[in-house]
């Protein structure tokens, strides 16, 4: 069968081959000890239909988009059958949830298809999210609803195109079955459309994979997992003995996470559930649940209603929480190291990487050729003003790049004020904005008009440079909700159009201005547009 569908997709399932598996072949919920994975056959669905796919991800795998529409592939992407080389399994991990050790979690509704080797030799893990219960499903059903699947599918691809490291999404398949969910956790479950996303990443390994054997005192499995990860996912770390390699690996995880969080902060992304089981060791954004995009700039904002009380995972705390999560990984690795020296050094790499990535990204967003210390207070003050003025983060920065080199406070500030959701609150900050503008100009935010360059040419150059750092299109919460409602009514074309817009987030797309509009008033408090629960 495979030769007619796709001659090049070859599987090499190293996780299964090289790590200890759970000997139990039956699929029932249990604690799994001394094993890194369990058999987890997907539960077939009634009526699978391909609702959307990513041509780019198909391309990474060497698949044609046409191949994906064949019944063989649609069935495989629904979990109804396996193509040659595919194996269905779930992996065992633990995690800290909302700051507390939660014990075994594991892939409760993600079932691996295996590790595909593309023609260029790159390895991609494929997972079906929502394909049925596994030994790790605890008290849940292993299914996913269409609304959260659309959100994961679109955001994975949107983040990639924004330049933010992320797991990818190959396909969105409607299951033709319904799933019962209590969306608001208020005792009113209802039947919702079910769906399955096939997600793709070089590795889905999380901090929680190491925490669980460490917490159980299973140092043999812990050591094996680390050695496997070094060999499969970090083959470039070859220098030194085992201890040095583990130290170098940890430092690299920290550095990658630092860059990731800086990128989230620069585009206004709030993950929403930064539990250690949702933190990738490759520094990828992983597990899209009740995430959201900052609209009015509020560091205390979280899209996750489950976290509304403590706001542990709000926008402004993400850098601190990421470090806390890396400290959990450090604690898990302790049994493998003679002392904490390398772990402490690794955590310092997080601080350094987060710091340097943030300053580079925000220098670019402000239009400075590089970061200087004087920019720090300017940025701090800007954050305060944006907050007090209820300004839309994405819209504000895009407007900043649009200003001409001839702009003065009188012409620039009214244009920037358009980014506010509350003009009266902007007006209350008028004096602050004028002072900020003077400082911004004083720090040479505008290039000198060089000899032979007109003011217009200089402005265009500035805009081009700044627009590359300030997206025009992000997956605004209300935009996702609109295409979800359309898809729930049976029409997935809105997903395709939105995906296409999000493919070029930094470019002007004539005719598609509506996708860049600030959140409309009706969406301010609407479920799905402003706040989400974990129910998915
Ligand atoms: P999350 O915070 O969404 O990443 O989920 C935490 C844990 O709950 C993970 O181990 C998931 O696999 C599991 N989980 C979440 N939703 C479901 C579901 N519908 N069925 C089975 N397991 C689930
Ligand atoms: Mg998770």
Image: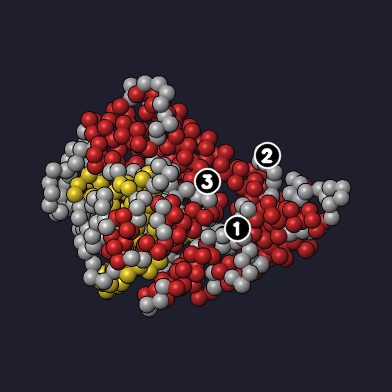
Q: Residues within 10 Å of mark 3 (few under 14, many from 20)?
A: many
Question: Which residue in the structure is indicated by mark 3?
Answer: 262
Give residue 323's position: percent from left, percent from top: 43, 40
Q: Residue at x 59, y 70 (%)?
A: 512
Q: Residue furthest right?
A: 451
Q: Residues within 10 Å of mark 1 (few under 14, many from 20)?
A: many
Q: Residue at x 38, y 69 (%)?
A: 51
Q: Residues within 10 Å of mark 2 (few under 14, many from 20)?
A: few
Q: Residue at x 35, y 33 (%)?
A: 231
Question: Which residue in the structure is indicated by mark 1?
Answer: 506
Give residue 462's position: percent from left, percent from top: 73, 53
**Which secondary structure, mark 3?**
helix
Res 509 quadrant in image: bottom right
Q: CA distance from mark 2 to mark 1?
A: 25 Å
Left or right: residue 523 compared with residue 507: left
**Which secondary structure, mark 1?**
loop
Q: CA distance from mark 2 to mark 3?
A: 17 Å
Q: CA distance from mark 3 to mark 1?
A: 18 Å
Left or right: residue 71 compared with residue 426: left
Mark 1 and ligand 2: say if the CB distance to the nearest ligand atom is below 8 Å.
Answer: no
Say whether residue 310 is visible: no
| Mark 3 or 1, nearer chain start | 3
**Quadrant showing the N terminus:** bottom left
121 in relation to 528, above or below: above
Give residue 388's position: percent from left, percent from top: 60, 60
| Mark 2 or 1, nearer chain start | 2
**Which secondary structure, mark 2?**
loop
| Mark 2 or 3, nearer chain start | 3
Give residue 240's position: percent from left, percent from top: 40, 21
289 in relation to 446, above or below: below
Q: Which mark is residue 372?
A: 2
């Amino acid at each position: 069968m495979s030769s007619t569908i796709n001659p090049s997709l070859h599987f090499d399932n190293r996780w299964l081959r090289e790590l200890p598996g759970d000997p139990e072949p039956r699929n029932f919920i249990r604690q799994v000890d001394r094993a890194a994975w369990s058999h987890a056959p997907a539960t077939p669905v009634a009526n699978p239909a391909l609702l959307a796919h990513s041509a780019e991800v198909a391309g990474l795998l060497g698949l044609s988009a046409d191949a994906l529409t064949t019944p063989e592939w649609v069935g495989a992407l629904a979990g109804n059958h396996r193509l040659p080389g595919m194996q269905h399994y779930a992996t065992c991990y633990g995690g800290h949830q909302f700051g507390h050790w939660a014990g075994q979690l594991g892939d409760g509704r993600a079932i691996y298809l295996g590790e595909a080797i593309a023609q260029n030799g790159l390895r991609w893990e494929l997972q079906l999210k929502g394909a049925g219960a596994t030994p790790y499903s605890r008290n849940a059903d292993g299914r996913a609803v269409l609304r959260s699947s659309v959100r994961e599918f679109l955001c994975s691809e949107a983040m990639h195109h924004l330049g933010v490291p992320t797991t990818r999404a190959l396909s969105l398949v409607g299951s033709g079955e319904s799933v019962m969910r209590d969306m608001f956790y208020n005792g009113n479950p209802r039947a919702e459309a079910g769906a399955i996303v096939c997600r793709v990443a070089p590795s889905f390994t999380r901090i929680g994979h190491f925490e669980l054997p460490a917490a159980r005192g299973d140092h043999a499995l812990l050591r094996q997992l680390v050695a496997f990860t070094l060999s499969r996912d970090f083959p470039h770390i070859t220098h030194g003995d085992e201890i040095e390699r583990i130290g170098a690996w940890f430092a690299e995880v920290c550095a990658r996470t630092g860059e990731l969080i800086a990128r989230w902060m620069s585009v206004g992304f709030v993950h929403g559930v930064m539990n250690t089981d949702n933190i990738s060791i490759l520094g990828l954004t992983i597990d899209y649940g009740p995430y959201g995009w900052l609209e009015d700039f509020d560091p205390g904002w979280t899209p996750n209603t489950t976290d509304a009380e403590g706001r542990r995972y709000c926008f402004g705390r993400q850098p601190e929480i990421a470090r806390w999560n890396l400290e959990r990984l450090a604690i898990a690795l302790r049994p493998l190291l003679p002392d904490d020296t390398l772990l402490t050094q690794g955590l310092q790499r997080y601080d350094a990487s987060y710091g340097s990535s943030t300053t580079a990204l925000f220098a670019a967003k402000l239009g400075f050729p590089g970061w200087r210390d004087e920019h720090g207070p300017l940025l701090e003050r800007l954050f305060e003003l944006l907050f007090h003025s209820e300004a839309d983060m994405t819209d504000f920065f895009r407007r900043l790049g649009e200003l001409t080199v001839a702009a003065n406070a009188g012409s620039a500030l009214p244009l920037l004020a358009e980014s506010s959701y509350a003009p009266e609150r902007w007006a209350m900050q008028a004096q602050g904005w004028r002072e900020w503008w003077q400082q911004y100009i004083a720090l040479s935010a505008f290039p000198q008009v060089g000899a032979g360059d007109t003011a217009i040419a200089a402005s265009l150059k500035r805009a081009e440079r700044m627009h590359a750092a300030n997206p025009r299109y992000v997956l605004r919460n209300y935009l996702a909700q609109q295409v979800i409602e359309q898809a729930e009514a049976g029409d997935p074309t809105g997903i395709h159009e939105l995906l296409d817009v999000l493919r070029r987030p930094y470019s002007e797309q004539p005719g598609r201005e509506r996708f860049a509009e600030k959140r409309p008033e009706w969406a301010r408090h609407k479920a799905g547009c402003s706040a989400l629960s974990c129910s998915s």
